[in-house]
Image (spheres, grey):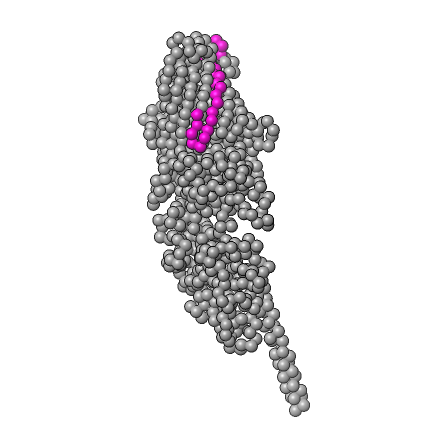
Amino acid sequence: MRLADARAWTLWLCALLLAIPGPTRAQSEEERRRQLQERLGIEKPPAPPGPAQTAPDAGGVEQGAATPAPAEAPRSPTAPPARPRPGSARPRVLTFVEDARPILVKQCESCHRPEGSAGRSRWVLRGEPGDYEATVRFVKPATAAESPLLKKGTGATLHGGRKVFPAESSEYATLLQWIEQGTVQGSAPAVSVSPPSVVSAPAAPPSTPRPAAPPPGASTPTPGSPSSPEPVAPSATASAEASPPASPAPTVAADVPRFAPELHQQLLAACSSCHSTGGLASTSRYLTSEDSEQHLRSVVPLVAPGSAATSVLYQRARGEAHAVGAVWEQGSAELALLARWIDAGALGASPAAPAPANTAAPVASAAPAPTQAAPPATPHASAGGPPSGVALGTFPGLGSLSLNGRFDLNYERVHYNDNPFQEGSGNALRSYHHFLFLTRQSTEDPVTLTLEMLSLQFWEVGYRPRGETWPVKVFAKVGKVLVPFGGDPLFHHSYGGHAGFDQRVLPVVFAREGATVNVQRRQGSFLLSADAYVLAGYQLRRADAVLNLQSDFAPLEETRLGVGARLGGSWGPINVWYSAFYNPLGFGRRLLLQALDVAAWRPRGLPVLERFSLGAGLLRADVSGGEQEGHGGPGADYYHFASYLQLRFHPSEWLYLQYRQGLRTFGNQRGRILDSTALTRDDGSTHNVGVVARWRGLSAGLFQYWNLEKVDEVPDDFTRLMVAYEF
């Protein structure tokens, strides 16, 4: 009996010892939950007044998930401290207003808004209560992971906007849990105040109207809630206190990015090497400028305020239809800033800081000029610059279409040697550029379109496959494509000393029916580019004819395919290109066309040199073969040669002075550059001086050309006054 009593007393003693630390263990578990809550930035709603401590948080009625205040958990045996969902890591039921909608606004609203590229889709965020009803149509609470909202966002099903958030991201986990918990709508939480007057804002950015002042009775935070003043950002506190009671988003005004100074400097650093007045892209619509106001005027036509996805500037910055690829990689802070600036309305320079002494005076003093501090809220309406083309809208299956163009008018004094007023000279009024382009740039899918509409000089349909893990970027085009030959395709080759419609070596617009593929890879500060193409090429009209590189193309019904490649590399302001093209000409003859181009564009930060840009190039076209047919060999093989050297001086961002010269020789059989035994009036050189001024889309220039033939000098010097406009 004593042994049994000892065993009984031992069991009772063990039970008592195990029962004593129970509340302490529960309390430490609650402490750990509060610490996790603080690390996640989750704020529990304040407890309602009165003895009842089982009121659920926003939307909790639907779930029946009641959580007592942590301080009363040990005193309420009927209300366990844990939630009915033991596997959930969140201490409260997630809601659309507080948790899901901020994620959707951040990741999806740039396209899925009324004026966005997906504004005509079935799901549009309008910033109103109807967003909840629009969203729940695309969720499946019973099988949350199969919800179209999640499968589209992760790219598991076809989505024009591609992968928005990966399945392993915190955004995906939050949306999945919100759906699993029953897609609770919730309501805008009140903002609690900790004495004396510090606002404790929720961790998620406000996306719906919230009152600026707390309601009566909400001044005391719930015990254990992370509402102390420490985690509150001073800027958020100040903006919340200063905003009017009906302000829909108290912190938005302080967070809206402005063009100057930050974005202005960011674009200067990334784009000026090409998009300055003497850069590789000096003939494009976008020109950078040290003057922030002038720079903004050039940017304005390329953005659609409120919609970064459909803005040409943003598309080019992320690498779409951009010759040198992405300026900033996806996910970079620079690209995000550009998108936020456009989505916020593309505002101008930062406004001047108000009088208080504790404002950021150094930033205000760093602005370019006080007069630039307060441009209008919509610079498109008052900047006076050209519109961003003619926006035709976004259409299902067609994407975002727009019209752009370039037109010019030239007054020329022609038919003289040296003296423009000598007898026999004359006047001419001509227009060389009358182009109207229809372009399709859509971020909904990788297909692009460029069509020259007036004379069908060229048209291209492009496709850009996207691989998340690809080390290179690929872009393919088909149509009457601009041949990627030389440093600057389109119609600005300078071989022989001429450019544009004065060109005498290559076609004025070097475009042919065919297909091209471009591959790019960025390695640190180096950008490498490679083009490969096949197209309808040249043919000889007769076996003994001398090939004309401007016009001797084979008719399409007798297509002779040519293949080519172009390799390029850039490092800072220096660009180097090597181009090669091979084409069978008939009669056993063949063409090998090669070019080497080098450009150095205004190296920023180098005194004196940063005012100059330099371009140089060599071209050689060899025609050989045909020995077996009896048409080639020594005495029959020949080559064409052309070169150029161009120097520009930029006294300001809107003005440059130019000197260009080049040599061209045709049908050479001896020597490397010039065959002095077979000179004709086609062999010669050109020297050109000019001055060009640009203002927004308008440019004007005055040029003098001296054409020097090797033999039989002809009166073909000319003076040109040019006025051009592009939009």
Q: Position of residue 623 (x, y in %)?
A: 44, 19
Seen in the image, is 610 located left or right of residue 428? right
View extreme (left): residue: 557
x, y (%) of residue 335? 50, 43
Which residue, as the protein is rendered here, is positioned at the far front? Answer: 355
- In percent of the image, x 45 and y 64: which residue is there? 181
- Reply yes or no: does residue 684 show up in magenta: yes
Residue occupying the point 34% across, 45% down: 396
Q: Quadrant of the C terminus?
A: top left
Q: Position of residue 632 (x, y in %)?
A: 43, 15
Point out the stretch of residues depicted in magenta: 675-700
Question: Looking at the rendering, which quadrant does residue 8 occupy?
Answer: bottom right
Task: Report the front residue among 298 and 327.
Answer: 298
* Residue 415 visible somewhere in the drawing: yes
Q: Is residue 550 above or below residue 37?
A: above
Q: Is 367 in front, or is 393?
A: 367
Q: Position of residue 568 (x, y in %)?
A: 51, 31
Write the residue at 35% across / 42% down.
393
